[in-house]
Amino acid sequence: MAIAKEIMKVIEAVAPIQLQEDYDNAGLQCGDPNQEITRVLCCMDVTERIIDEAKTLGCQMIVSHHPLLFRGLKKISAEGDYISRCVYRAIKEDIVLYAAHTNLDNAAEGVNMKMVEKLGYEVEDIQPLVPIDNESQTGSGKIFDLKSPISLKEFKSKVAQVFMADSCNTNNDYDFDDTKLTKRIALCGGAGVDFIRDAERQNADVYITGEIGYHRMFGHPSICLIELGHWESEQYTVELLKEIITNALPQVEVVMSSLEKPVKHVD
């Protein structure tokens, strides 16, 4: 058993709140920070089904990657929009809601390092793609070199397999010679379209991210862009959150949601 603020503290030791972007709302979303917690549910997004799952599993706290609350609520009601309903349900069920978002994205051992680990290659010279602080290795994305270069075809296949992407969108103005060797890789979980130029300036062969968008794929003939989908790119964040809590507080049981799946968009 632990109290909620102890769990918050161990997460923030890895992902300090001050690392979050200005637009973000990471941290405690609702609930009592002094509540006793025996079981935590980790997920990507808080929904009513997730709150039901937490209640069924006996979890007193939900730790999500994406914050439920980004903007002010005018009312908290069982008949409001889904955000209002989720806050209402969480309070009614006495479930603490907490989110580790862009602070975990920007952490040295955060979302993007987990992506690197999941690829499973031996790498060297790993750095933040867009540094916040070079000494602490914090910042957006990662850029690194593979110790042993491989063909683009093999690399793309591995990326699709690891991130369970039904299809990886790529840029049509890149010369897709599958025999090209790939060595320098940049990546960023989530919506990392704004960092394409940073990857280009640092001579990355490939840039992997969750969201780029059709029209922003054009104009980058010197780099292979791979768009996985937002959920696909960040799915291992749930595993990372579980590891952070379990390693520091083994007395707290941590479970990962079984309900989540990628949201498919039709443009």
Image (tube, rainbow, N blue to C red):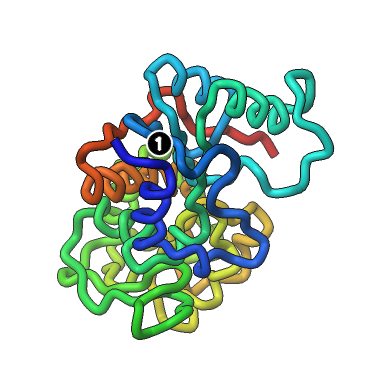
Residue name at image x 62 percent, y 64 percent:
218
Give whichever of 58, 5 is nearer the camera. Answer: 5
Residue name at image x 37 percent, y 34 percent:
37
Q: Is residue 36 visible?
A: yes
Q: Is residue 173 left or right of residue 118?
A: right
Where does the N terminus fall, quadrant-wise?
top left
Residue name at image x 44 percent, y 42 percent:
232
Q: Is residue 224 visible?
A: no
Residue name at image x 48 percent, y 76 percent:
130
Three-letter amino acid code at disc 1?
Answer: Cys
From what the image shows, is residue 77 above or below residue 245?
Answer: above
Q: Position of residue 69 (x, y in %)?
A: 66, 44
Where does the C terminus fall, quadrant-wise?
top right
Q: Position of residue 75 (x, y in %)?
A: 81, 33
Total number of numbered labels?
1
Q: Identify residue for label 1.
A: 42
Single out the residue that lies furthest toward the right.
74
Single out the residue that lies furthest toward the top.
56
Q: Position of residue 125 (x, y in %)?
A: 25, 79
From what the image shows, is residue 56 above or below residue 186?
Answer: above
Single out the residue that lies furthest toward the front.
34
